[in-house]
Image (cartoon, rainbow, N blue to C red):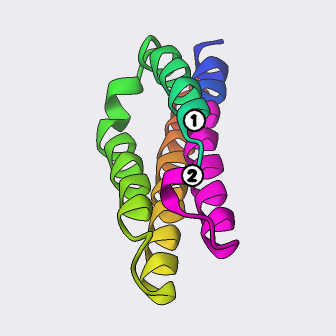
Amino acid sequence: MWLIRLQEAAGDLATSYLQEAATANDRRRAGIDRSEVETATYVVDRQKALGRFRTLPWSSDFEEQRQAMGRGIEGVWLAWYTSDDEFQAAYKSARAAVSEFMAAVGAQILRDGAYR
């Protein structure tokens, strides 16, 4: 039961980062100024997902990967006014951080699920 909850909460948290990064990418490609991109929804959703995630067993085991996702999305916003190549590199890095987080969570679930 706890492993299922961990997977669901981790998925919600990861999805919040992916959605924000995708929105940033789409808006930048559309030529919209960074100041006009709405982010409040992502912040609220992420805090809910983070709170839920942190209440679960094993969540502290993924703090490094969780922080990497935060740095990744910050990098996307910081790269807004850089070249397209730099922005896309930041976007790719943010998505990679999410993949690494989910891979780590998945490995934990497989490890602990095998013994149940």
Q: In which quadrant of the rendered image does the N terminus lie?
A: top right
Q: Main secondary structure of the magenta part?
A: helix
* Amino acid found under the numbered disc labelled 2: Glu
* Amino acid found under the numbered disc labelled 1: Tyr
Residue, x 65% and y 63% (percent of image)? 27
Viewer-closest of 20 and 18: 20
The quarter of the displayed image where residue 97 is located? bottom left
* Label ID, residue 42: 1
Q: Give the image location of residue 94, x and y in percent.
A: 47, 61
Viewer-closest of 84 and 63: 84
Residue, x 44% and y 63% (percent of image)? 76
Is 81 magenta? The answer is no
Q: What stretch is highlighted in magenta?
A: 10-36
Residue, x 50% and y 59% (percent of image)? 34
60 with respect to 32 (left or right) = left
Q: Give the image location of residue 62, x and y in percent.
A: 37, 37
